[in-house]
Image: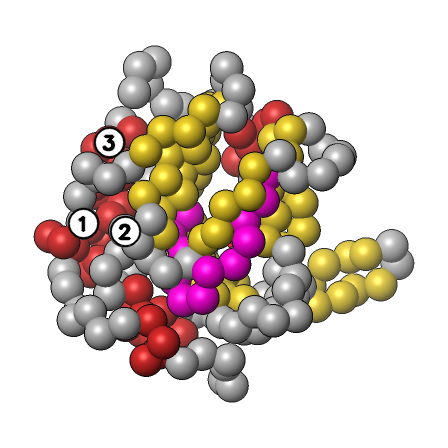
Amino acid sequence: MALAWQDSLFGEDPAEGAGALDLHALQRRPLDERSWLDVARGWVPDHADLLDELVRTAPWRQRERRVWDADVLEPRLVAVWGADELDRLPPILRGARELLGERYGVEFDSALANLYRDGRDGVAWHGDTVRKRLPETVVVTIGLGERRRFLLRPGAAGPPAVRLDSGGGDLVVMGGRCQHEWQHTVPKDARAGTRLSVTMRHSRPLPARR
Ligand SMILES: O=C(O)CCC(=O)C(=O)O
């Protein structure tokens, strides 16, 4: 797979285990009275190594989308780990899943990785489908590699109201009614290099307090 990816651009941090992760730097950013983001920049210290490992080992698939009456290739590759496959994740992601599960009081029972090979890859405005089953959700995103714009808007139309970057080991957690009442996107960007995101979701309801 040819990628616009230069490991050396992203620092020399040695590979570290899940013990390197903690949640002290996590900062809450309310979006409105029902939705919020928790953000920790540079949360995974060895993100370049993790990106390389996932590029080599994740079960990548090219999905198609129906657009009007044509099947078109989704502009990114995806890899999915179901509930009985999560022990195949790299150790640092298994540790992240456990730590974040404790933090939010929920079992993250699936993981999805997205590989944006270059700036021609992206994902359009959407809310995650988990919203159809649960009244409130917590969706974890760990961004690896090059930082790309990660935009949010209230509702299903209009300009972005929140602009983040995501990559470089950043952790972004979308919570509350964010998947129902907000949308997010990683827009195409001609200048961008390779970015990979790992998202984790839960299928059971959240506890009343977290
Ligand atoms: O790559 C990202 O940060 C976002 C991915 C996403 O929104 C999705 O897969 O539903």
Q: Position of residue 107 (x, y in %)?
A: 30, 35
- The residue that disc 2 covers is 43
Foreground pick, 106 / 209: 209
Inspect this view and state whether residue 83 appears: no
Which residue corresponds to the image point at 87% horizontal and 54% vertical from the top-left?
A: 68
Label for residue 81? none
Q: Is residue 133 left or right of residue 49?
A: right
Q: Amino acid at mark 1?
A: Leu
What whole-number distance in Å separates the C-alpha atoms at marks 2 and 1?
7 Å
Rendered position, 41 above or below 7:
above
- Disc 3: which residue: 103
Between discs 2 and 1, the one toward the N terminus: 1
Is 147 inside the magenta-drawn segment? yes
Q: Which residue carries the number 1 mark?
A: 21
Taking the spot 42% from the left edge, 29% from the top edge, the residue there is 29
Residue 180 screen position, x and y as percent: 59, 27
Point out the tag, 3 or 1, that comes first from the N-terminus.
Answer: 1
Q: Is residue 192 visible?
A: yes
Q: Residue at x 55, y 53 (%)?
A: 149
The answer to whether marks 2 and 1 mark residues whose Cβ atoms lie closer than 8 Å is yes
Report the front residue among 19 and 13: 13
Q: Quadrant of residue 125?
A: top right
- Give the magenta range: 141-152
Q: Amino acid at mark 3?
A: Arg
Q: Between disc 2 and disc 3, whose residue precedes?
A: 2
- Looking at numbered disc 2 in the image, what kind of residue is underneath it? Trp
